[in-house]
């Protein structure tokens, strides 16, 4: 009986840790202030002229991701987080709609960063990265 009393607190902690891990695996998709789901897209630069304004504005160069790389800086495009209104096929294979209207700024080194989108008023999040 004394051994059970010694083991019980450790068993309770182990069960608690397992429950915490199990429930964290089911995080809900991020939502904007209106409660709409948000979708994250990562810029995938093409081989030719990778960070030109035209390439950054091209929605075909943005890939849906659930695990984006961290974006630290302001020099070139990295990720966009947008509401479902700007996403084609949100349930299966999300892609950006051209109505997102990505606006850019090209710095002195020729790298385009995202400055605005049509979704900015709906909680869109723009993240750029360092050169």
Image (tube, rainbow, N blue to C red):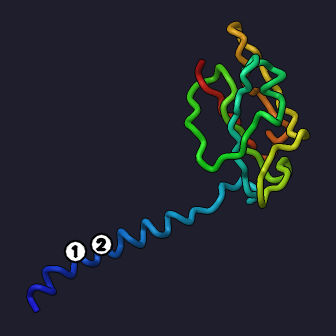
| Depth order, front residue of 42/10 | 42
Q: Is residue 50 above or below residue 63?
A: above
SS category of the residue bearing label 2: helix
**At which x and y percent is residue 15?**
34, 76
Q: Residues within 10 Å of mark 2 (few under 14, many from 20)?
A: few
Q: Quadrant of residue 42?
A: top right
Q: Hey, which residue is sitting farthest right in the picture?
A: 99
Q: Which mark is residue 86?
A: none
Can residue 127 be seen here? The reply is yes
Q: Circles 1 and 2: CB distance less than 8 Å?
A: yes
Q: Is residue 73 left or right of residue 5?
A: right
Q: Hey, which residue is sitting farthest front in the picture?
A: 47
Tell me what residue is drawn at x 8 percent, y 88 percent. Answer: 2
Tell me the quarter of the image containing the N terminus: bottom left
**At which x and y percent is residue 111?**
70, 16
**At which x and y percent is residue 16?**
35, 73
Can residue 125 be seen here? The reply is no
Tell me what residue is drawn at x 70 percent, y 7 percent. Answer: 108
Q: Is residue 12 above or below residue 72?
A: below
Q: Is residue 36 left or right of residue 101?
A: left
Tell me what residue is drawn at x 82 percent, y 36 percent. Answer: 60
**At which x and y percent is residue 33?**
72, 54
Q: Residues within 10 Å of mark 1 (few under 14, many from 20)?
A: few
Q: Which mark is residue 14?
A: 2
| Depth order, front residue of 9/111 | 111
| Depth order, front residue of 44/73 | 44
Q: Quadrant of residue 90?
A: bottom right
Tell me what residue is drawn at x 83 percent, y 27 percent. Answer: 103
SS category of the residue bearing label 1: helix
Cα separation, mark 1 vs mark 2, equals 6 Å
Q: Is residue 109 above or below residue 53?
A: above
**Mark 1 lies on residue:** 10
């Amino acid at each position: 009986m004394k051994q059970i009393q010694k083991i019980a607190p450790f068993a309770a902690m182990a069960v608690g840790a397992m429950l915490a891990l199990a429930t964290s695996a089911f995080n809900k998709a991020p939502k904007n202030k209106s409660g709409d789901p948000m979708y994250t897209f990562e810029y995938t630069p093409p081989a030719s002229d990778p960070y030109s304004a035209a390439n950054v504005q091209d929605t075909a160069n943005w890939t849906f991701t659930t695990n984006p790389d961290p974006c630290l800086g302001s020099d070139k495009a990295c990720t966009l987080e947008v509401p479902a209104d700007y996403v084609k096929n949100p349930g299966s294979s999300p892609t950006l709609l051209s109505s997102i209207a990505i606006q850019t700024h090209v710095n002195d080194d020729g790298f385009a960063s995202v400055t605005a989108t049509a979704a900015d008023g709906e909680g869109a999040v723009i993240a750029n990265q360092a050169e």
